[in-house]
């Protein structure tokens, strides 16, 4: 069954090769793409990109695992673990069942940027083979819920 990974927030698609972090650009934890979030006033609600269970959650990142065991990591900004949760509001806990589009975390990409961090959001198809994925084209404007990755 094909799994569609949806955009968890508004922004523009960035190729992993252009993400200035070797863990993501080197695909060390898996293939995918990133979204450069729209800089809007106030906070942005980050949504579940797939239906499943929250298998891991931190203020700056989360993993959703689908019923067929495929997992997607959403990482809010680069090196944002250094913020120690400041500026992030977590809406779900580990083990929670979610539908695609359910709110997971609220944050402010503009605040993260003002604090000196890169707000780009890597979205990783964990344990996937790069050749199996169809990725949205770099530069594509996306809204929450738009298809980013097709994973057969």
Image: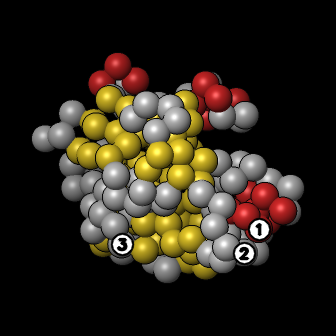
**Disc 2 vs disc 1: Cβ atoms closer than 8 Å?**
yes
Q: Nearer the viewer, mark 1 or mark 3?
A: 1
- Residue drawn at x 53%, y 45% is 12
**Disc 1 vs disc 3: Cβ atoms closer than 8 Å?**
no
> Which quadrant of the structure image shows residue 96?
bottom left
In percent of width and height, residue 60 lies at 64, 62
| The C terminus lies in quadrant | top left
In percent of width and height, residue 131 lies at 35, 19
The residue to which callout 2 is attached is 87
Task: State left or right for residue 52 relative to residue 23.
Answer: left
- Residue drawn at x 54%, y 30% is 15
Name the mark on residue 68: none
Disc 3 element: loop
Disc 1 element: helix
Task: State left or right for residue 47 relative to residue 116.
Answer: left
The residue to which callout 3 is attached is 102
Q: In terms of depth relative to the viewer, which is nearer, 13 or 61?
A: 13
């Amino acid at each position: 069954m094909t799994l569609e990974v949806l955009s968890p927030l508004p922004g523009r698609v960035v190729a992993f090769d252009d993400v200035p972090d070797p863990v993501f650009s080197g695909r060390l934890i898996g293939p995918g793409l990133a979204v450069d979030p729209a800089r809007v006033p106030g906070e942005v609600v980050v949504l579940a990109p797939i239906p499943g269970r929250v298998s891991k959650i931190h203020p700056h990142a989360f993993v959703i695992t689908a019923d067929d065991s495929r997992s997607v990591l959403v990482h809010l900004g680069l090196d944002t673990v250094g913020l120690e949760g400041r500026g992030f509001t977590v809406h779900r806990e580990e083990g929670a069942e979610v539908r695609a589009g359910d709110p997971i975390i609220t944050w402010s990409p503009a605040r993260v940027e003002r604090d000196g961090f890169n707000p780009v959001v890597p979205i990783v198809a964990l344990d996937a083979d790069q050749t199996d994925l169809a990725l949205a084209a770099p530069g594509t404007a996306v809204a929450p819920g738009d298809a980013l990755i097709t994973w057969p």
